[in-house]
Amino acid sequence: MKKRIITLKEIAKKLNLSISTVSRALNNHPDISEETKKKVNDLATSLNYIPNIFAKGFRSHKSNIIGVIVPNITHYFTTTLIRGIIEEASLQGYRVIVSESNNDVNKQTEMLNTMLQFGVDGVLMSISKMTRDVDDILKVLNTIPLILFDKASNKIPCTQVVINEEEAAYNVVEHLINTGKKRIAIIKESEYSYNSEKRYEGYLRALKENSIEIDDKIILSVDDISMRQGKRMTNVLLTLKEKPDAIFAITDTAAIGVIKTLKKINIKIPEDIAVVGFSNSLNSLIIEPKLTTVDQPGQKIGSTAVKYLIEEINNPNEIQVNKTIEIKTNLIIRDSSFKI
C-alpha cells in the first residue's frame, strides 16, 4: 500500500476547522483556544503529521535552514568544522543541509543553486581549491547571506572565518630554526590553493627574517597533497646533494607520508631530519614519532561561522563586506621536531 503524507487540509477537514486555524494551533498561536490546540495536536499526532518546512518557509520567507558546502566531507578536519556548525545552528534553532563539492567547481555551482532552490536562509561555504571564476558565488551573495570559512578567497567581498594561515606557518618554521634547523624544505599545493599560498608566505617570511637562504630545490609543489605525494616528494628531496634537515608538509597527511619514508630508510627523526605537519589530525598522534603540527580549532571555526551567518540573516541591512574573523591556532610540539 502506497504511503501518504498527511496535510494540514486533511486535519482541518476532519475537525471542521479552517486550514489557517489548524496551522496556528500547531504553532501554539495565542489567538487559538487551549481546547482547539489540544484537538488539533492530538489528531496530528495520531495521524503522524509531519510539518512541511519548505512550505512553511515559503509562507514566512524564512526556512531556518542553513546550507553548508565543503570540498570533502571525509577529511577529519572537515568533520570537526561540521560538528561545530551543526551544534551551534541547533542551539540557535536552525537546521543544516550539508553537501560536498569534491573540489569540482561545476558541482560547487550546482550545490549553490540547489541550496537556493531549497530556500535556505544563508550559506556557509569552504570553496573548491580550483575556484577561479567567482561570478556564480557573487550571484548567490547578492541573493542571500553567504559566509566563507576555512578555504576562502580575496575575490569574494563577504565575511570570512579563517585561521591566520601565514602566521601559523611562520611559527612552524621559526620553531624549526630555534631547534637548530637551517635547511627547511616545504611540500605545498599548487599555486591555486589559497590556504597553501598563505602557508608558503609564512614559510618565506620566517626564512627571510632569520637570514636563511631560500632554495627553490627544496620548495616542492604538488596538485594532491596526500600521503602518497608526501612519500614521493621525500624521495625527491633525498636525491639532492644537499639534503634538508627539516621538512614542513602543509597537511598532516603528507607529513605522515614523509615520516613513513624517512623511517623506511632509517633516517633519524628529528635528529637528521625534523618533520612538521598542519591540522592536528588523529593520525598525528598515532604515527611514531608523534607529529609536530598546527592545531586548527575546527569546531570553533564552524560555530563562529554560524554565529556570524545568523547575525547577517537577522540583520541584512548591517552586513559588512570584506570582514575577516581570524581564529587563533596553536603549534603542538611533539617528537617529530623536538626531543626533550
Image (cartoon, rainbow, N blue to C red):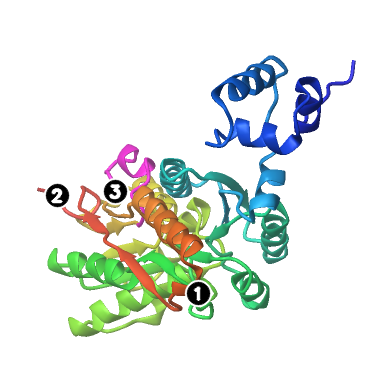
How far apart are labels 3 and 2 at the CA level?
12 Å
Residue 333 in percent (x, y) is at 20, 52
Task: Tell me how far mark 2 sits from mark 1, CA to CA.
Answer: 38 Å
Q: Residue at x 33, y 49 (%)?
A: 280
- Given residues 134 and 185, the one toward you in this image is 134
Q: Are marks 3 and 2 in contact (CB under 8 Å)?
A: no
- To which residue does mark 2 refer? 339
CA separation in Å, label 3 and label 1: 29 Å
Q: Nearer the viewer, mark 3 or mark 2?
A: 3
Q: Which of pointers 3 and 1 lies earlier in the amino acid sequence?
A: 1
Q: Is residue 220 left or right of residue 340?
A: right
State which tag comes first along the sequence, 3 or 2: 3
Identified by mark 2, the residue type is: Lys
Tag nearer the camera, 2 or 1: 1
- Tell me residue 49's x, y (percent): 70, 25
Q: Residues within 10 Å of mark 1 (few under 14, many from 20)?
A: many
Q: Which residue is mark 3?
A: 291
Q: Amino acid at mark 3?
A: Leu
| Disc 1 residue type (three-letter) | Ser
Is residue 238 visible to the viewer in this orientation of the structure? yes
- Check disc 1 and report the residue beneath it: 153
Main secondary structure found in the magenta portion: loop
Write down the quadrant of residue 210 in the picture.
bottom left
For image coordinates 61% across by 74% down, the residue present is 142
Residue range corresponding to the magenta coloring: 278-290
- Report the side of 164 relative to 79 (left or right): left
